[in-house]
Amino acid sequence: GENVEQHPSTLSVQEGDSAVIKCTYSDSASNYFPWYKQELGKRPQLIIDIRSNVGEKKDQRIAVTLNKTAKHFSLHITETQPEDSAVYFCAAAGGGADGLTFGKGTHLIIQP
Amino acid sequence: SAVISQKPSRDICQRGTSLTIQCQVDSQVTMMFWYRQQPRQSLTLIATANQGSEATYESGFVIDKFPISRPNLTFSTLTVSNMSPEDSSIYLCSVEARDRGTDTQYFGPGTRLTVL
């Protein structure tokens, strides 16, 4: 089955700086890669996703890049703000009918 | 997106008992899933709830322990059977819904289960 590795487990950045979280996956058949943000005590919220026919996708301060050859994808957050502090999870799936395999999560801390 | 509700939101149960968690969606969806999130851990897929047929379980999860029902396209239940303290987790349902032309998974608010 699919295996998703996520790094780092904790990331502390100064407010206004950029944050990058990286994930690798094992199953070359995976073609859907969402990112979720989870605040304490709340459900995971989708923040951005990418499919294997696209190399990069951007939504305001958030961007995701995908390298299918190397089987890795990354989340980039620019101009970080205190409200970006949360746990971020990457995930992978083989398509519309598949459940998600999650990485272990990254605790992002934005230092004021 | 889809509006997803779960009942109960939390419960404290005695070992050896069973708890049934309900998941309701405000629109018909083809795919529904159940996940477990153990304390300070990531999410793990338990099973895919199939409408009109038996659920599809992931490795490490079995029907006798986690029976699932999916009577229609808006509702599913997950039962945690013969509970032990190791079953203490947050259980989340998710649905696949079409958003801006693409299929995306959205999560319910979760059910926080504590087994004593």
Image (cartoon, rainbow, N blue to C red):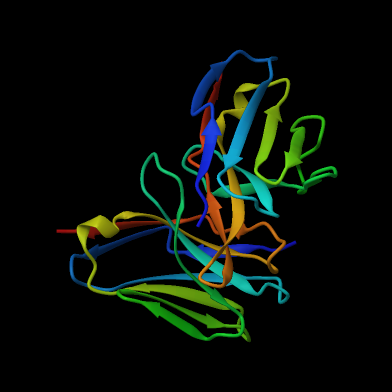
Instruction: Tell me where residue A69 sits by quadrant.
Output: bottom right
The residue sitting at 78% across, 46% down in the picture is B51
The outermost residue toward the left is A112
Judge left or right: residue B37 versus residue A85. right
Quadrant of the rendering where the C terminus of chain B is positioned: top right
Is residue A63 shown above or below A9?
below
Question: Which residue extends farthest right?
Answer: B53
Residue B6: give x, y in percent of width and height: 54, 35
Q: Residue at x 47, y 84 (%)?
A: A56
Name above or below for residue B114 compared with residue A32.
above
Residues A20 and B25: in front is B25
Query: Which is more toward the observer, A53 or A105?
Result: A53
Residue A77 position within the rendered picture, expressed as x and y whole percent measured from the top left: 32, 71
User: Does residue B50 sit above or below A26 in this rendering?
Assistant: above
**Residue A73: where, in percent of width, then height?**
52, 76
Horizontal and vertical percent position of residue A88:
42, 58
Residue in view at x 64 percent, y 50 percent: B28
Between B60 and B81, the one lying in front of the other is B81
On screen, residue B10 above or below B108: above
Residue B65, located in which quarter of the rendered image?
top right
Q: Looking at the image, which residue is at 80% across and 44% down?
A: B55
